[in-house]
Amino acid sequence: MEEGVMAPTNPQESTLCLRTLLTQCAALSEKACGVIRDVQQRREAAGTFSKLEMKDLTDPKTYLTEADECAQRIIIRGLRQHFGPSLVVVGEEEEEDESDEDVATGEHSTDADTGAVTQAAVPDTCGACGGLLDAAAYHIPPELVSLVLRDVCVFIDPVDGTKEYVDGRLNAVQNLIGVAYRGRAVAGVVGLPFPDSETRHCFETLGVSKGSLPDEGSPLILCGVTGSKSGVRAVGRRGVQYRLARRPSAVHSQSDSLVLAVSADLSRGSGAPALESTREAVIRAAVSCGLKVEYLYAGACGNKILKVLTGQADAVLLNLKTSKWDSCATEALLRCGICAEGVGAGAS
């Protein structure tokens, strides 16, 4: 039986340990963030990406780089290595056949004969992320500890914000791995290859060095489970662990404004009719509470939601092309705090 897949309570169905799955996802996200940073470093040295194309020539938001492909390949093959082929995994990018030539990015490579991820790409242990979700340190609701394997789906966006990545707006780039169970987001990992100062100031360390901030210039891996009493946790350089010190709230308690995270075009009223009506409804609701609406311009779906998670915004308006690989991981982290649709239901 694959690692992390437990003996079934019902003889006819296997179960999966969520803690094991999420720990592996965090370790793989750490590797994926390394790929994203490595590709960017080579781009800066060469002056261009070694691979850059558009999946849809009519849509400037559909860039594809080698970082997208390599990061997704590492994550999917890592999950297959640990949990076997029965785990349902959905990635944004098209998967290549196992016989296709493997992508190699520095130390992040795959075995050409077996298709398995090499030791450099997927370690036997979880590296710096290994202790992040220890049973003694991180609470998982009892109903989510063990999941029926066939009802689990992992959604992957290897590089959320590829357009921002290409444009050099690196703080907006994320690696997203979300775990859905029976159609609902229950756990997520958000890898930040280039976290900005505002985000770093929303976290503080646990343990001996409690209170200090994540290191500047190094990735930050966020993890969370819906309904966890432990909230959102993170791991940075050298395995230092952090907790989210600023919780999301319905409105800023010491402000007369409601901050709405949006793309610049949506704030100008150039979105689809459904988005315009939603934006206008938010404005009306804010005014009825004696608040004015302020816009926080942010690119990429995950980056916008991160603004709410860290308390930099109160609400987010996403475009109509948002997919499950964009929202699954970030919704799960928000559900460690507060998250609702405009109609009051859970985000989906």
Image: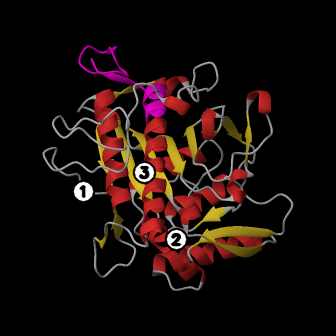
How is the rendered protein coloured? secondary structure
Residue 109: x and y in percent read 31, 43
* Relative to 274, 66 lies left or right: left
Q: CA distance from mark 2 to mark 3?
A: 16 Å
Q: Using the image as rendered, state which of residue 280 and residue 29 is in the foreground.
A: 29
Amino acid type shown at disc 2: Gly
* Residue type, label 1: Glu
| Residue at (68% x, 38% y) in the render | 242
Query: Camera-side residue: 219 or 297?
Result: 219
Which of label 3 and label 1 is nearer to you?
3
Residue ID for mark 2: 168
Q: Quadrant of residue 7?
A: top left
Q: Tell me the quarter of the image containing the N terminus.
A: top left
Residue at mark 1 to residue at mark 2: CA–CA distance:
24 Å
Mark 2 lies on a secondary structure that is loop
Q: Residue furthest left?
A: 99
**Residue 149 appears at what percent x and percent y?**
32, 29
Range shown magenta: 1-24
- Whether residue 348 is visible here, answered yes or no, is no
Kind of residue at badge 3? Val
Name the N-terminal-most of marks 1 and 2: 1
Please check the rendered image and state whether residue 155 is part of the magenta-colored stretch, yes or no: no
| Residue furthest right in the image | 254
Residue at the spot of label 1? 94
